[in-house]
Image (spheres, coloured by chain):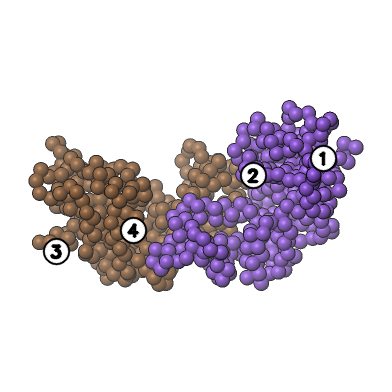
Chain colours: A purple, B brown
């Protein structure tokens, strides 16, 4: 299950299988050895959001063509929005509580006989609130593979951040927040964008204060947001402080709503440096200690688990 | 001060002055008689947001050209984002507490000698929170002109809704909320747009429930929003219900934050039918009775007041 590190191959990778994380805006692929070693990797902007059903196979082959065997078929295990209704082939949702991964994988039709693609299904929930995930279930499976027997709460920051309760090998329940998408819309499409553009690292003190402010008065979010605009006009609020406050206000409100998830729990954040760092810092401002696992490590461990399940079945 | 109604002119309007409401996305003009009668009106999409400084005069003349006198100069009184730093000429901000309108108006340079334009300044506030308004001060002045001696709270729904406390002829303080812009971004640019498009009147029962829900748990907004997406995928939530819930959740959170403004106060909503109706309905769900004044009536009464002030000074 271990991702033992990246070993660039001299004469072209000859992987045992190929791992694919195919989101709305990006496609990422890894040439994998059966022992979990990453032989090579690739990435393109051919996300599911910009592709028609017939566009998926060419987009994939453009990245992995050099890894394909001269003869025979190589397994390709994919997770993410590629399995959505508007994706390559719908992989459905499995209702929680359940293990994060289970067969069958969905197999889209392909014209290149050298690949056999399997897409991991998502997870759904009807109660206490309707929710869905696609891609995060694979990261959660990766957490379980890397830390067998661990129970706790996984926080997965992102466009739609997720909090998931893990117990006895199952996802018990989960909750999504549109925090990341709100940040993206407000910082690039709203009147606030004028005051947020600019260089400079984000202002950590301003972020911490905004987390506590957003947590203390989450109902005032829409007013606090306009304050950023007014301060830009009236008092020349620096862009770095404005960005930090926007992020802090949104994450602070999320943390209050997610309190039952993290209060007194063992919290593991799965995410990339910047985003996971921000959530860890915000939790810390609320007095909570958390650990972080890189998203790539989690998704590769999860896809490895799916690959093992699929191989066992076909053996 | 009364807007006595619309009288279409047979042989072309010959107004005493011209009223202009020039916002970010629209330009609206009225041919006015000195007694407040509206002789004619016009509208274009040449909002301040799409114009360079040299584009304002042609955009205005395109609408009012037929109203201009053969000889002499006609006063043109304008309010709104036309007076912003990125507008035609910056009209500055006057700090509250203060009367909503005061001279001097800002006079942009024009090449057509038949018009003399005056732009109303905005209002600003530094404490208790930084805030600005531009355009709403004129509507508030209109409220005061139409209801002399009235004290209370004016709620002005819009892209950036405002709550303003009026006492003894002054704006004492005010607070802006980005509620309208959040609704626009979420309904047209976010993942929710897929589930919100569709025909059918908004679902009033769903709106009322969402107002109370948004008010009861405002911190859960980002999670409630994602629930709309999940219910669209899992249970086929109708678009009319989803739109109503999005609007209700956002307005409900605003009302909780604005509670000090409306609790036990005389609330007057200034706005157009749909938007003002939604706020009135939401206040009603919170047990508050409010009255509504059409936005056009308020802005014309306010611009008439500015016209009278300016005429008195130049007399």
- Disc 3, SS: helix
Q: Which residue carries the number 4 mark?
A: B85
Q: Which residue carries the number 3 mark?
A: B313
Q: Nearer the viewer, residue B85 or A129?
A: B85
Residue B302 screen position, x and y as percent = 24, 57
C-alpha distance separating marks 3 and 2:
63 Å
Q: Which residue carries the number 1 mark?
A: A14
- Disc 4, SS: loop
- Disc 1, SS: loop
Closer mark to the observer between disc 3 and disc 2:
2
**Chain letter of disc 4?**
B
**Chain letter of disc 3?**
B
Q: Which residue is at a point 70% across and 60% down the rendered structure image?
A: A269
Residue count near mark 1 (Cα–Cα under 10 Å), binned few <14, some 14–19, many ≥20: some
Q: As displayed, is residue B162 above or below residue A61?
A: below
Residue count near mark 4 (Cα–Cα under 10 Å), binned few <14, some 14–19, many ≥20: few
Q: Which residue carries the number 2 mark?
A: A26
C-alpha distance separating marks 1 and 4:
61 Å
Q: Is residue A190 left or right of residue A112?
A: left
- In the rendered image, is residue A188 in sight? yes
In the picture, the quarter occupied by the C terminus of chain B is bottom left
C-alpha distance separating marks 3 and 1:
86 Å
Q: Which tag, 2 or 1, sits closer to the chain's start? A: 1
Q: Which residue is at a point 27% across and 70% down the rendered structure image?
A: B168
Q: Quarter-wise, where is residue A147 in the image?
A: bottom right
Q: As displayed, is residue A282 above or below residue A193?
A: below
């Amino acid at each position: 299950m271990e991702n033992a590190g990246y070993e660039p191959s001299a004469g072209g990778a000859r992987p045992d299988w190929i791992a694919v994380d195919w989101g709305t805006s990006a496609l990422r692929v890894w040439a994998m050895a059966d022992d979990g070693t990453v032989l090579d990797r690739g990435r393109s902007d051919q996300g599911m959001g910009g592709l028609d059903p017939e566009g998926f196979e060419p987009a994939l082959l453009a990245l992995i063509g050099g890894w394909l065997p001269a003869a025979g078929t190589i397994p390709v295990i994919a997770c993410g929005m590629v399995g959505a209704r508007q994706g390559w082939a719908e992989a459905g949702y499995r209702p929680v509580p359940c293990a994060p991964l289970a067969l069958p994988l969905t197999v889209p039709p392909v014209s290149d006989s050298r690949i056999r693609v399997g897409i991991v299904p998502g997870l759904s929930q009807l109660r206490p609130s309707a929710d869905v995930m696609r891609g995060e279930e694979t990261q959660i499976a990766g957490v379980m593979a890397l830390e067998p027997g661990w129970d706790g709460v996984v926080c997965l920051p992102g466009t739609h951040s997720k909090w998931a309760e893990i117990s006895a090998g199952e996802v018990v329940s989960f909750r999504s927040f549109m925090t990341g998408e709100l940040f993206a819309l407000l910082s690039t499409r709203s009147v606030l964008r004028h005051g947020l553009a600019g260089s400079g690292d984000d202002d950590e003190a301003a972020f911490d204060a905004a987390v506590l402010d957003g947590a203390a008065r989450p109902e005032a979010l829409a007013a606090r947001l306009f304050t950023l605009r007014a301060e830009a006009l009236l008092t020349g609020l620096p862009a770095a402080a404005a960005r930090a406050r926007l992020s802090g206000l949104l994450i602070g409100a999320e943390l209050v709503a997610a309190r039952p998830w993290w209060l007194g729990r063992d919290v593991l954040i799965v995410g990339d440096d910047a985003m996971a760092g921000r959530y860890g810092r915000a939790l810390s401002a609320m007095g909570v200690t958390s650990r972080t696992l890189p998203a790539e490590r989690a998704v590769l461990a999860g896809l490895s688990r799916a690959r093992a399940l699929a191989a066992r079945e076909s053996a």
